[in-house]
Amino acid sequence: MPPGRQRPSRGLLAGTALVGLVLAWTWAGAEHASTGLQPYLAMPVDAVHLVAAGAWVGGLLVLAGALIRAGDEVPTEAVTRFSRIAFISVCVLAVTGLYQSWRQVGSPSALVDTRFGQLLLLKAAGVGLLLCLGQVSRRWTKRLARPQADGGRAPLRALRRWVSAEAVVGLCVIAATTALAATQPARTPSAAVARERTSATVTLKADFDTGGPRGEGSADIVMDPGQRGPNAVHVTLTAHDGTPLDAPEIQASLTSRSGSIGPLPVPVERVSAGHWSVSGFQVPVAGPCDLSLTVRTSEFDQTTVRESFEIR
């Protein structure tokens, strides 16, 4: 405590802590913790997470400012005490953060397939950098507590640099946390459905030439949702000039490259000129597959093309 300054009373400290808890609970009730899976547990966990983050990152900002303003008269006891508080806060953040990540992400793939997961990875990288910087600061804190020939100025200068770096990274972590609060969690049903629809639907395009008149064209093949189980398969034939190619017959089959199934006939039926489809086609396995398409444009002219893709 600097000379001339009085230590805050216990009542003031208790009141400040109570206000902090209330603010943390208010934040938890206004963001992701109040909805979705296990809100009765998520809200208190989120409030504790926020308090621990405030004690660590907020304390870093205060400590960095104090170290810069204090000159050579830095109370070593205060620095050491904050080091202990920061360690406890990090332990609490690790436990509560793991629970929140499991609750809001749900699967490892969502960490890279969703914006929420990507922001969470960015935040985790920032926290990891903070931990590395904090470990260096703890070493200089221990050296500052030892008697030094130069009055402890060398450890103090080093501690100022490392704590200032921690404060800057802490602000970046706060920015990532704010972005997370405004982003839909990856575990919500709507996000999961959107992710499946955008990432799993199979779209293929195959060029062919049967060798006869109007035998050159392309086939657009769509398999939706492109996953194991029932699928809708659509085949659209387009002639070389861009018009629909209404071939007399097409045949399709599916083969697993692992050899577990196939060739399995895909019973597409003509819907309109140049368009064949089937609904409820059962794909029994997931993994890499080949789709073979045989196109017959006349009594004697036909060809077979093959495209590879993956069933999820």
Image (tube, rainbow, N blue to C red):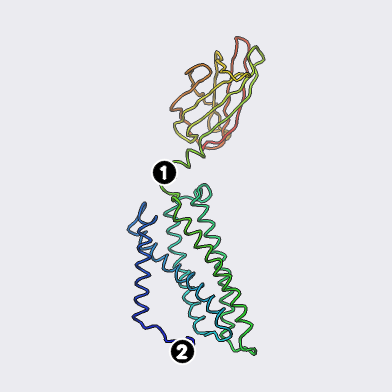
- The x, y position of residue 247, in whole percent, is 56, 15
Which is more toward the observer, 280 or 23? 23
Q: Which quarter of the figure has residue 64?
A: bottom right
- The x, y position of residue 172, in whole percent, is 54, 62
Q: Which residue extends farthest top? A: 299
Q: Which quarter of the figure has residue 304?
A: top right
Indicate which disc residue 167 carries. Answer: none
- The x, y position of residue 264, in whole percent, is 52, 26
Residue tagged by mark 1?
190
At numbered mark 1, what does the secondary structure look like: helix, strand or loop?
helix
Crowd tier of the residue under label 2, counting other residues whose Cα lies within 10 Å: few below 14, some 14–19, many 20 or above: few
81 w.r.t. 281: above or below: below
In the picture, measured across the screen, residue 182 lies left or right of residue 125, that is left
Amino acid type at mark 1: Ser
Crowd tier of the residue under label 1, counting other residues whose Cα lies within 10 Å: few below 14, some 14–19, many 20 or above: few
Q: Nearer the viewer, mark 1 or mark 2?
A: 2
Amino acid type at mark 2: Gly
Q: CA distance from mark 1 to mark 2?
A: 59 Å
Q: Which residue extends farthest right? A: 211
Residue tagged by mark 2?
4
283 w.r.t. 195: above or below: above
At numbered mark 2, what does the secondary structure look like: helix, strand or loop?
loop
Which is more toward the observer, 44 or 264? 44
- The x, y position of residue 58, in whole percent, is 47, 71
Tally of numbered discs: 2
Q: Which residue extends farthest left? A: 40
Residue at screen point 59% across, 73% down: 162
Q: Which of pointers 1 and 2 lies earlier in the amino acid sequence?
A: 2
